[in-house]
């Protein structure tokens, strides 16, 4: 058993796909019609868990669902190296990388204003200290 898909609300699906595929290097794993809209998923290469990028149900309002901390934490080998690579792609960081007791930590904003955590294990954080 594993988590297959997490819903991430966005204002512009195509803009979000561009961000995740071009800036983070993820794969677009699905883009198919679904009712009057479409089902679009993106995932890190080789991973089973993906985001579905969606505008939400008919009663959806961007100001209630898009932006702020998403609760998503993306695990990387080294938060400092990941930060340097993403900065080269003009990814905006809201929290620069730092070392915490639980490991390396930083936070970045996607094209829609959603903020995600970036974490690396304690062992990687200690070796960069």
Image (spheres, rainbow, N blue to C red):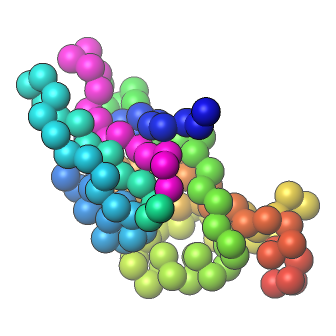
Task: Give the quarter of the figure containing the N terminus.
Answer: top right
The residue furthest left is 36
Residue at x 26%, y 15% (from the top left corner): 59
- Residue 44 is left or right of residue 36, and the answer is right
Describe residue 44's horizontal placement relative to residue 94 as left or right: left
Q: Is residue 53 magenta?
A: yes
Whole-percent x and y of residue 75? 65, 60
The quarter of the picture where the C terminus appears is bottom right
Q: Residue furthest front?
A: 1
Q: Quadrant of residue 8?
A: top left
Stretch in magenta? 47-60
- Towards the viewer: 7 or 96: 7
Residue drawn at x 44%, y 84% is: 88
Q: Is residue 49 shown above or below 101?
A: above
Q: Is residue 126 visible?
A: yes
Q: Main secondary structure of the magenta part?
A: loop
Which x, y percent locates residue 73? 62, 51
* Residue 37, image quadrant: top left
């Amino acid at each position: 058993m594993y988590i297959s898909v997490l819903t991430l609300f966005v204002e512009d699906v195509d803009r979000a796909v561009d961000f995740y595929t071009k800036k983070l290097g993820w794969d677009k794993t699905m883009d198919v019609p679904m009712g009057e809209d479409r089902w679009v998923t993106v995932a890190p290469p080789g991973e089973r868990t993906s985001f579905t990028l969606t505008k939400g149900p008919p009663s959806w309002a961007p100001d209630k669902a898009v932006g702020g901390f998403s609760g998503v934490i993306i695990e990387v080998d080294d938060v400092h190296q990941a930060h340097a690579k993403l900065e080269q792609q003009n990814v905006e960081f809201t929290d620069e990388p730092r070392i915490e007791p639980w490991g390396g930590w930083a936070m970045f904003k996607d094209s829609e204003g959603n903020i995600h955590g970036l974490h690396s294990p304690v062992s990687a954080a200690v070796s960069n200290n």
